[in-house]
Amino acid sequence: MSGAPPLSALDAVAGRRSIRAFLPTPVERETVLRILDLAARAPSGSNIQPWKVHAIAGEARAALSAELLAAHEAGEPEVPEYPYYPESWREPYLGRRRAVGWALYGSIGIGKGDRERMARQHGRNWLFFGAPVGLFFSIDRDMGKGAWLDLGMFMQNVMIVARGFGLETCPQAAFCYRHAITARHLGLPDTEIIASGMALGFADWSAPENNFPTDREPAEAFTRFTGFTGF
């Protein structure tokens, strides 16, 4: 656990970012349990708490990463287990996606059209970007859309609570594109689906890919106020 003073809730949210380079410093099992216990205060419809977590570290994590990376390097096709993105892109979403992609690649010196280095960077997903702990969030396949909202709120809590322990995260939908390999390593039953993976560990703040800016639209741009008075 970090010796830094604890973050306020506001600072924990405001400073959250997806970390893509971690230090090899181990994270204790009890710390992971504490994070998950606190994150479980997330709301859920009728308190059904539909989330399930699979935490992996050590040799088990290394074995999973090795098989996933081998599949990536062999060019085996990625097949999404569920449609995370829209079938066709349009603005403003396409522009935002491209902007963050080029900001990431630019931070580590990958130019447009350098597909080989882009592929290598994508492959770092399977290594959890060097994080010692991988978390997988699954849900029963027969759950409705509302339960997926519950799971998302739980995952957000995990990312924010982790910062209170001096840890950082990177949510990784990439694992849904190689679901069969991941599910086999986790011993996941066919009745469950992995919604997302997540890297957990101590950030390497010297890495440029952890320091490029990511824009957010101001609330005024995406909020419609009705019935308010004053300025």
Image (cartoon, rainbow, N blue to C red):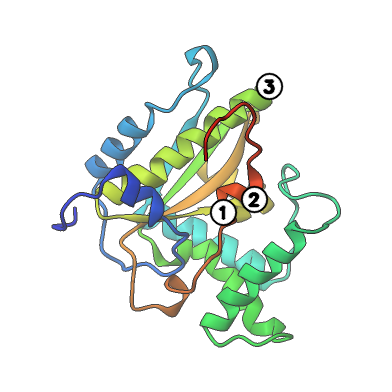
Position in image of residue 92 (x %, y %)? 75, 58
**N-terminal label among 1 and 3:** 3
According to the picture, the residue beneath numbered tag 1 turns out to be: 218
Q: Which of 218/88 is in front?
A: 218
CB of mark 3 within 8 Å of CB of mark 2? no
Rounded to the nearest angstrom, the CA distance separating label 1 from label 2 is 6 Å
Q: Residue at x 54, y 28 (%)?
A: 150
Identify residue for label 3: 142
Q: Residues within 10 Å of mark 2 (few under 14, many from 20)?
A: few
Residue 77 in sight = no
Say which label, 3 or 2, has the lower sequence index. Answer: 3
Secondary-structure class at tag 3: loop
Residue 180 vertical position relative to residue 122 in the rendered view, above or below:
above
Could you tell me residue 37's position as x and y percent? 31, 30
How many other residues sit within 10 Å of disc 3, few (<14), some (14-19) or many (≥20)?
few
Amino acid at the residue labelled 1: Pro
Task: For marks 1 and 3, give the one nearer the viewer.
Answer: 1
Q: Is residue 106 above or below residue 12?
A: below
**171 and 231: which is toward the camera:** 231
Per the model, the C-alpha gap separating discs 3 and 2 is: 36 Å
* 158 lies left or right of 147: left
Report x, y in % for residue 11.
32, 51
* Residue under the image location 52 percent in, 83 percent down: 108
Label 1 close to label 3 by CB (< 8 Å)? no
Residue 6: x and y in percent read 20, 49
Q: Is residue 51 visible?
A: yes
Q: Could you tell me the amino acid type at mark 2?
A: Ala
Q: CA distance from mark 1 to mark 3?
A: 36 Å
**Element class at badge 2:** helix
Looking at the image, which residue sits at the far right?
88
Q: Secondary structure at mark 1?
A: loop
